[in-house]
Amino acid sequence: MKQQDDPRPIYFISDAHIGSKDAEAEKKKEKYLTDFLYFLAEQDPAPILYIVGDLFDFWFEYRYAIPSLYQKMLSRIVYALDKGVEIIYVTGNHDFWMGPFFKNTLGIPIHHGIYEARHWQKRFFIFHGDGIPKEDRGYRFLKSVIQHPLTIWLYKLVHPDLGIPLARWASAQSRNHYKKTPEEEKADDLKYLHYAQTKLQEGYDFVIMGHTHRPVFEGTPERAYVNLGDWMRYFTYAVFREGQIELKSWIQESAASTFHMEPETARSVEK
């Protein structure tokens, strides 16, 4: 477990899925994310940022090719890093094929699956959250196939001009497959809440997840389950300072202004 007790604020975001929307929606998304990253870069001391999966709509790492539609956001990330922001990436279900680029080129450590950390003597359980519902057995099998070294080796034989559009299409099909009714969403939220409660009972102070794209805060500022929502509809993030956590929404054009979420934005799971 990583021990880290210092005065820096700690931020958490997930599920931006850069590259997943039409041009106008992507422009808005990148504007908000750019403002957010510049806001972090201007802080003193520079904060820590956890990206809890699916920053990009897909990530397949060829040895020499990076998708052109990601270049702008990567440059914003480099700017934040150069200003002293520490970024830690916990992978999601659209991050199957992350190679050494983030770690070796950007200096961003990559953690697959569950990541545990300690800040201000608080224990954090950080996990994107994919595969939690029992009925996701098919997904878990597919994940093991997709992440197999042979699968990755074979896909690298496909030219990027074919492989990248194919991966974007597959990501879009995955999102369509996971569209659910409001009743199904509530049922899933309860499953995530119950999973988080088991981790809190194990002694964690904070359970941080994403994947559902629905922001949820259950608990107190000192001990809580937080689902980070997304940067597609809600533009939500969590911030931890001096032992307490908040779930907030970034909806201003300027990085200089953030405010607390309106009550209807931060969900409370109905038990």
Image (cartoon, rainbow, N blue to C red):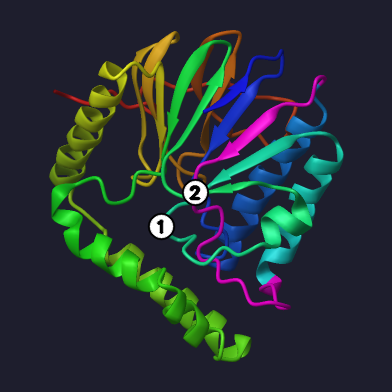
50 and 187: which one is in front?
50
The percent coordinates of residue 21 (x first, y second) are 51, 64
The percent coordinates of residue 210 (x first, y second) are 40, 41
Quarter of the image for residue 148 reads: bottom left
4 and 259: which one is in front?
4
Magenta stretch: helix, strand or loop mostly: loop
Is 171 above or below relative to 92? Answer: below
Which residue does the numbered mark 1 point to in the structure image?
Answer: 93
**Disc 1 on helix, strand or loop?**
loop
The CA distance from mark 2 to mark 1 is: 7 Å
The residue carrying pointer 2 sits among few (fewer than 14), some (14 to 19) or many (20 or more) residues within 10 Å by Cα, namely many
Q: How many marks?
A: 2
Q: Determine whether, in the image, residue 247 is placed left or right of residue 258.
A: left
Residue kind at label 1, given as amino acid type: Asn
Label ID, residue 31: none
Asked whether the beta carbons under mark 2 and mark 1 sit within 8 Å of each other, the answer is yes
Residue drawn at point x = 46 percent, y = 24 percent: 124
Q: Earlier in the sequence, mark 2 or mark 1?
A: 2
Residue drawn at point x = 26 percent, y = 17 percent: 201
Range of magenta residues? 44-68
Q: Residue furthest right?
A: 82
Which residue does the numbered mark 2 point to in the structure image?
Answer: 53
The residue carrying pointer 1 sits among few (fewer than 14), some (14 to 19) or many (20 or more) residues within 10 Å by Cα, namely many
Residue drawn at point x = 25 percent, y = 35 percent: 192
